[in-house]
Image (tube, rainbow, N blue to C red):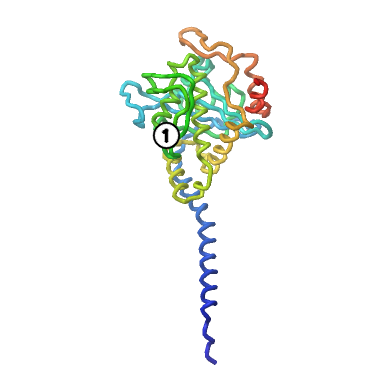
């Protein structure tokens, strides 16, 4: 018995079903493929100390000011150092926090002795910086993330620039920051100068920490919206991130994604961003020059609040100030 001819409507339905199946397969395969590709691109460095875990999840972010990436023309400065040291914590419950540690914080560097916090990175790279921060705060670092100066430029340019605000006119030769008081849309190069400027700021490292946090907040603010669902946009952002970040071996693309969410929460109205309690911003012990001395009474309480998630949120701080 001859086969019955297939109607046009049946052919059409089959094509629709086939197209739907292919679309579903691609939809499921794309994020898996993107994840595998991204994980294979991440650069790693041994950094973690293996100390016993503390509550929540804590990320140590270090901004390396090595001139090796060419972001800044400087033939006289050599070696590794870090001008940006931040502790980002997602507690088990409560307030997420982004805390800037002044680079000149007076610390006891394991195996070295008294010194400035950023000297730990110069002496022993990421591992010694992690150990020094853990000893200072009593908080175990779960993830280490390092970005170079060129990385800041690339990341800001990768999100299409950001809006930054500062209330003073600035013309700082060392950082290259030239600023008219107010808010301005800037590219990566200007954002880097904004984040690096210190000498023209009467508050020194404290003001620099505030600007660095503002740059992060501005970048996080651009990572939202329908455009993030576009494959081309996703590829570009992953490429920029993996080209410019170095992490510990256990920190992959999923951990970086969780870090981005924690950044957004910590810099939003329900989070805390700031610095630890400071007793003396110009403490001069021995031959170390000017250092930043944390308050030996208030700082331990502050670090416990970081772990417990009991720091006041941005909204609560504004309500108290008002």
Provide residue 314's location: percent of width, then percent of height.
Answer: 62, 27
Answer with left or right where residue 296 lies relative to residue 146.
Answer: right
* Total marks placed: 1
Q: Quadrant of the C terminus?
A: top right
Q: Secondary structure at mark 1?
A: helix
174 or 132, which is in the foreground? 174
- The answer to whether residue 113 is above or below residue 222 is above
Q: Residue at x 44, y 36 (%)?
A: 161
Which residue in the structure is indicated by mark 1?
151
Q: Residue at x 52, y 17 (%)?
A: 105
- The answer to whether residue 66 is above or below residue 201 is below
> Quick one: which residue is furthest to the left in this view?
75
- The answer to whether residue 321 is above or below residue 54 is above
Quick check: can you spot residue 102?
Answer: yes
Provide residue 196's location: percent of width, then percent of height.
Answer: 43, 24
Q: Quadrant of residue 65?
A: top left
- The answer to whether residue 261 is above or below residue 77 is below
Provide residue 258's location: percent of width, then percent of height.
Answer: 57, 40
Q: Quadrant of the N terminus?
A: bottom right
Quick check: can you spot residue 52?
Answer: no
149 or 251, which is in the foreground? 149
Please tell me how crowded label 1 is: few (under 14), some (14-19), or many (20+) other residues with Cα within 10 Å.
many
Q: Residue at x 39, y 30 (%)?
A: 189
Provide residue 75's location: percent of width, then percent of height.
Answer: 30, 23
106 or 161, which is in the foreground? 161
């Amino acid at each position: 018995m001859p086969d019955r001819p297939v109607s046009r409507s049946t052919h059409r339905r089959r094509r629709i079903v086939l197209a739907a199946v292919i679309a579903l397969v691609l939809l499921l395969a794309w994020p898996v493929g993107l994840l595998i590709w991204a994980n294979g691109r991440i650069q790693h460095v041994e950094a973690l100390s293996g100390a016993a875990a503390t509550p929540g999840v804590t990320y140590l972010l270090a901004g390396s000011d090595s001139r090796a990436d060419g972001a800044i023309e400087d033939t006289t400065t050599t070696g590794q150092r870090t001008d940006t040291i931040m502790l980002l914590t997602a507690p088990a419950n409560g307030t997420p926090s982004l805390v800037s540690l002044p680079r000149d914080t007076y610390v006891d560097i394991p195996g070295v002795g008294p010194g400035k916090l950023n000297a730990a990175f110069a002496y022993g790279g990421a591992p010694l910086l992690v150990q020094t921060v853990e000893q200072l705060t009593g908080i175990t670092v779960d993830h280490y993330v390092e970005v170079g100066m060129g990385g800041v430029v690339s990341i800001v340019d990768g999100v299409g620039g950001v809006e930054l605000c500062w209330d003073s006119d600035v013309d700082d030769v060392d950082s290259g920051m030239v600023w008219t008081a107010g808010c301005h849309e800037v590219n990566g190069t200007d954002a880097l100068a904004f984040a690096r400027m210190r000498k023209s700021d009467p508050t020194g490292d404290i003001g620099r920490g505030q600007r660095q946090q503002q740059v992060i907040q501005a970048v996080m603010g651009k990572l939202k919206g329908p455009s993030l669902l576009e494959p081309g946009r996703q590829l570009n952002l992953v490429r920029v991130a993996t080209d410019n970040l170095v992490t510990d071996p256990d920190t992959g693309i999923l951990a970086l994604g969780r870090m981005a969410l924690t950044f957004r929460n910590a810099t939003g109205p329900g989070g805390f961003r700031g610095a630890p309690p400071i007793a003396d911003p110009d403490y001069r012990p021995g031959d170390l020059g000017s250092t930043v001395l944390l308050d030996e009474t208030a700082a331990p309480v502050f670090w416990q609040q970081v772990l417990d998630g009991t720091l006041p949120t941005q909204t609560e701080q504004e309500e108290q100030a008002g």
